Amino acid sequence: MRTIICKKCGTPIDASLGECPVCGAVYYILPEESDEDESTRVWDRDTEEISAAIRRETDPAAAGGPSQPLPGPRPARTAPDRRTPDRRGIFAALAALALAILTVVLCFMNGVFDFSPRQTMPDVVGLTKDVALGQLRSLNISPNVIYEESDLSAEQVIRQSPEADRALSGRENVTIIVSTGPGAAPGPDTVYAEVPNVVGDSYAAAAAALAKAGLVPIRSSEAYSDSVPAGGVARQSPLPGARLPQGGEVLLTVSKGPEARTYSVVLTAGKGGSIEPSGRVEAAQGESLSFALVPDEGYELAEVRIDGVSVGQTAEYTLTDISGDHSVYAVFAAIPEESQPPEESQAPTESAPPTESVPPLDTPELTEPLPEPDAQPEESKPPEETDEAA
């Protein structure tokens, strides 16, 4: 390897490289037969010597020897092939995804993502079963009831699960254990009976089925039920499949049928009359409601509209078998006046105009009396001739 000194930065470099790896100066090695000294001249593109090398390349006579080609362009550096995926990165991404999925599943199982409103478990130990059920159902909690023999009085809550004052999730089961009263503990020869399913049966049929199984039916309470008709068994405790000793009691809740719903009937009247009753009236499902319409003086009933549909003119009306909300509106109209002949118009009496005071005329006084009406006026005679005229 032939080592030369870069004239630009002074770094020893390999002559076969073609450029200085430190400062990037391009150098040109003169041929061995040149008259130059043995030291190799290094060229920098920023100096005038590169121009001289170009002139020698184009004019060999001026250079004094055969020309040498300028060093070619630097070979492009080969970039590493990045198209090949990194297996370690793929494995790390898959492991992170599996860990995230496992975390989400565990959170769902533990109720972390349960955003339903939480209730606090009340303390019902020591209360009777009916009171405990009332408190729990007021909180929208439907507990499981399990009966157990104890020294406490019958129908009294012995234990509860979960404990009192604990926050409940929407999917958590609540159980209360109710005492069946004191009694002899079952021995090894005790015969057990499986509680049959009597929900939906009539109370008589359910009592017969329980008696046949060696159990005692107890009619505990009544409740409304949309699915079980009145008189049927809506609930039972213990649940079907439980095993009780022979003679054990099974509490039955008898259905009162669907709970009657209440609807509103709004009664209003227009101008010229009234409706009785008026305003908003509550009516139970299946009931009837009667109302009367009373017009005012000078008005008459025009029509009655129920839910916007006219039912004609009726002084009284009854809504039967009410199964929804209704509106009643009474329309009244003024009675038209009867046609009467027009009264005879009397001509007004003309009143004499007021007399005006007229001043008297200046007339000469009459010296001779006026002739009487019956007297004829004497004919005018020529005046008699006097003796003098004769």
Image: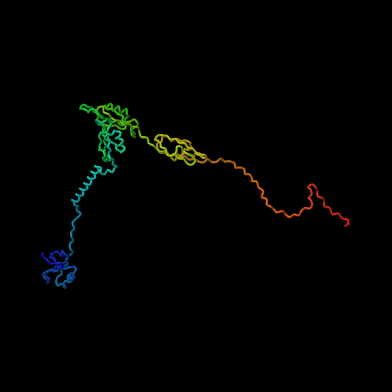
Q: Residue 37: x, y in percent?
A: 11, 71
The quarter of the rendered structure image containing the C terminus is bottom right
* Looking at the image, residue 358 lies above or below residue 47: above
Drawn side of residue 245 relative to residue 18, left or right: right
Q: How is the image coloured?
A: rainbow
Q: Is residue 11 visible?
A: yes
Q: In which image quadrant can residue 191 be found?
A: top left
Quarter in which the N terminus is drawn: bottom left
Counting every numbered tag in the picture gives 0
Q: Residue at x 52, y 39 (%)?
A: 297
In this orientation, which residue lies closer to the viewer: 356 or 184?
356
Image height of 381 relative to 229, above or below: below
In this rendering, the answer to whether 43 lies above or below 326 is below
> In front: 132, or 87?
132
- Tell me which corner region of the image, top left, top right, bottom left or bottom right, holds residue 122: top left
Location of residue 384 in the rendering, given as x and y in whole percent from the top left corner: 86, 54
Residue 225 lies left or right of residue 89; in this view the side is right
Q: Position of residue 320 (x, y in %)?
A: 42, 34
Q: Please tell me in which quadrant of the rendered image residue 41 appears.
A: bottom left
- Residue 139 place in picture, x, y as percent: 30, 38
The answer to whether residue 149 of the structure is visible from this angle is no
Foreground residue among 146 and 9: 146
